[in-house]
Amino acid sequence: MTTSRPHANGTAAPRRRVELDPDTVERDLARLVLTVVELLRQLMERQALRRVETGELSEDQEERIGLTLMLLDSRMSELRSKFGLRPEDLNIDLGPLGPLLPRGDSESD
């Protein structure tokens, strides 16, 4: 179900909502789960960057975190592909609160 809501400038912006169609329930569930995982991945990445910038991590820890985040990003790409999802499909519209994920971050692939 895609509806529109007006932007601040008056143009219509599509709303992305999880469908409840029995024929697409697996894809919709995967979309919801991957959205939560993507949100957590972005939060972990921001926290890791802050810790690197403040010098809290050793070089070994920085390398492990970097490799882990790269692996998670790769797995996310594989799962999105498996379910026919694009990165922007994971950015659920929260109505008056706006999109769940920051614009651009979830669409880096």
Image: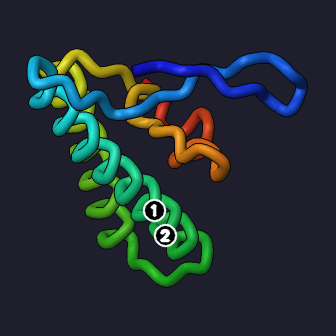
Label 2 Cα neighbours within 10 Å, binned few <14 / some 14-19 / many ≥20: few
- Regarding residue 36, the answer to whether it shows in the image is yes
Residue 101 lies, in percent from the top left, at: 52, 46
Closest to the observer, 92 or 17: 17
Point out the frontmost of discs 1 and 2. Answer: 1
Can I make out residue 78 in this image?
no
Tell me what residue is drawn at x 19 percent, y 23 percent.
21
Q: Which residue is mark 1?
A: 43
Q: Is residue 19 above or below residue 75?
A: above
Instruction: List x then y, in percent, for residue 85.
Output: 29, 21
- In the displayed structure, would residue 10 be above or below residue 38? above
Marks 1 and 2 close (CB-CB < 8 Å): yes
Residue 72 lies left or right of residue 35; in this view the side is left
Element on which disc 1 rests: helix
Q: Assign the N terminus to one quadrant of the image.
A: top left
For disc 2, the marked residue is: 47
C-alpha distance separating marks 1 and 2: 6 Å
Write down the quadrant of residue 43 in the picture.
bottom left
Task: List x then y, in percent, for residue 6.
Answer: 76, 26
Out of 45 and 86, give the one closest to the viewer.
86
- Inspect the image, locate mark 1, and give the three-letter code of the amino acid beneath it: Leu
Residue drawn at 86 percent across, 33 percent down = 8
The quarter of the rendered structure image containing the C terminus is: top left
